[in-house]
Image (cartoon, helix red, strand yellow):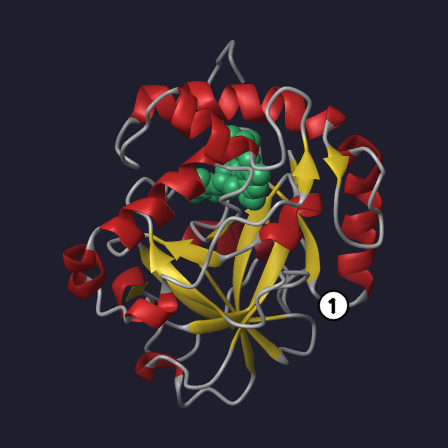
Amino acid sequence: QEYTLIKLKVLDPKPQALAHIKEDIYLVAATLRPETMYGQTNCYLHPDIQYSVFYATENESQVFVATARSARIMSYQGLTKENGKVRYVAGLEKIAGAKLLGAPLSAPLAKYERVYALPMLTIKDDKGTGVVTSVPSDSPDDFAALSDLKKKKPLREKYGLTDEMVLPFDPTPILKIEGLGDLAAVEMCSRLKIESQNEKDKLEEAKKEVYLKGFYDGVMLVGKYAGKKTADVKKVIQDDLIAEGLATKYVEPEKKVISRSG
Ligand code: ZZB
């Protein structure tokens, strides 16, 4: 499975644990939906997942944050200096997501200049990079997690987040899906009366519906390719992002499990 690896640059003031690093630092998120990057409102980390901070690119001029598992995979895809080797920033082979929450980020193509790293409790540590970029207009999981944070001040406080990191960010219309409108994930969450990010089954159903329709037949409303179908712009937007150094490719190896659903 080939993903686009979106690079969200960590801005100042950096989280304390990363403040001493001189290279540019990126949270890297794997997605199959590069055309939705216009709708990013934040990035998600799991507070309890351990992330690795490591040198990336051939000349080690950049630092990536992702799970150790995905760092290892990246090292076999030319994303580190030496094939099969991951060089960690000293002392940062493992750092809990919690310590990176509230980090200000620059998200490629997003209308918000500055977004923040926020917690999501349903992130899996064995999929992608464990970093999930958030598009609440078109991803029901993302909308549910953002809504939880907006509704619950104690949840924000628990993770040391200020209101400014959460409240100003609303789902933005970026593509239109017939029958679901221009905020498909919001629409599905409302139809299925989804109240929180923990409603796994309903969210799965919402995701299926939005994916099925949005992946191919959505029509772009914003950006350079407005008016075109999502299926037709996916690849060009990926190419554009890569050409600008804002993304790269990432291939997730097949799981060694025989599964019919894939
Ligand atoms: C942006 C985006 C925009 C996403 C959207 C989805 C949607 P899949 O297709 O099942 O492989 N994701 C990536 N890694 C993780 C993880 N470790 N834990 C939880 N979620 C993760 O799922 C790939 C999508 O799941 C990725 O694409 C990412 O969110 C998330 F409009 O990135 B996506 C209807 C979905 N819409």
- Which percent across, then down, holds residue 17? 32, 80
Q: Where does the image place residue 148, in percent across and percent down from the top left?
A: 28, 46
State the residue at coordinates (28%, 71%): 162
Q: Is mark 1 within 8 Å of ligand 1?
A: no
Q: Is 87 on the left or on the right of 251, as rendered?
A: left
State which quarter of the image contains the C terminus: top right
| Mark 1 residue crowding within 10 angstroms, few (<14) / some (14–19) / many (20+) | few
Q: Position of residue 176 (x, y in %)?
A: 69, 33
Q: Based on the displayed image, in which of its 4 quarters is residue 81 positioned?
A: bottom right
| Residue at disc 1, secondary structure | loop
- Label 1 belongs to which residue? 245
Location of the N terminus by quadrant is top right
> At label 1, which amino acid type do we have?
Gly
Residue 117, given in percent of the width and then of the height, sits at: 40, 63
Q: Nearer the viewer, residue 150 or 14?
A: 150
Give the image quarter of residue 251: top right
The foreground one among 67 and 84 is 67
The correct choice, above or below, for 105 with respect to 175 in the image is below
Tell me which residue sits at (62%, 65%) in the image: 80
